Image (cartoon, rainbow, N blue to C red):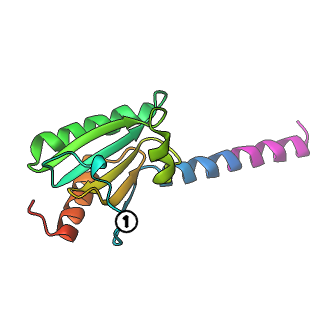
Amino acid sequence: MDSPALLAIAALVISATAIGLVIRARSGRIVVADRSEAADARLAVPGAEVTLLQLSSPVCSACAVMRRVGEELVAGEHGLARRELDITEHPELASAHNVLSTPTTLLVDAAGVVRGRIVGAAKPAEVRAAVRSVRESIGASA
């Protein structure tokens, strides 16, 4: 092989690696919001202090992972509920909450205010910490 071909292959491998690392770093990102948004009581599960509202799509493989994480946490924590909506059936939610990829899980308080978001699949401990932060911000008991 000649030198330009090897350089092109090396550049391609380096570029693909860089793109993969960026995607991996952004997956499972958790942001707990300090500001209050307009409340939408339809987002919250009645009776729950915090609702994990997972916005999914039919072709999302990471959605199943996040579904299991959410179900596990809800089973073990009082006052925590989970709800899942398909964004192809609710495109207005995706638009209103700037959902660019699935799964996106919104952490919603009892009034329907989005207090945080998780983009991608996250580990149970990370989600538990995000729920704890939301509860602390609203003054709810754990």
- In the image: residue 66, left or right of residue 4: left
- In the image: residue 58, left or right of residue 42: right
For the residue marked with disc 1, what is the amino acid?
Glu
> Splitting the image into 4 quarters, where does residue 61 fall?
top left
First to last magenta residue range:
1-14
- In the image: residue 77, left or right of residue 41: left
- Residues 89 and 26: in front is 89
Q: Quadrant of the C terminus?
A: bottom left
- The residue positioned 27% from the left and 59% from the top of the image is 130
Q: Quadrant of the N terminus?
A: top right
Rendered location of residue 27, percent (x, y): 46, 49
Q: Residue furthest top?
A: 58
- In the image: residue 5, left or right of residue 19: right
Rendered location of residue 80, percent (x, y): 16, 49
Rendered location of residue 83, percent (x, y): 27, 39
- The residue positioned 83% from the left and 47% from the top of the image is 7
Q: Is residue 7 within the magenta segment?
A: yes
- Residue 141 in the image: above or below residue 13: below
Residue to which mark 1 is pinned: 37
Q: Is residue 122 within the magenta segment?
A: no
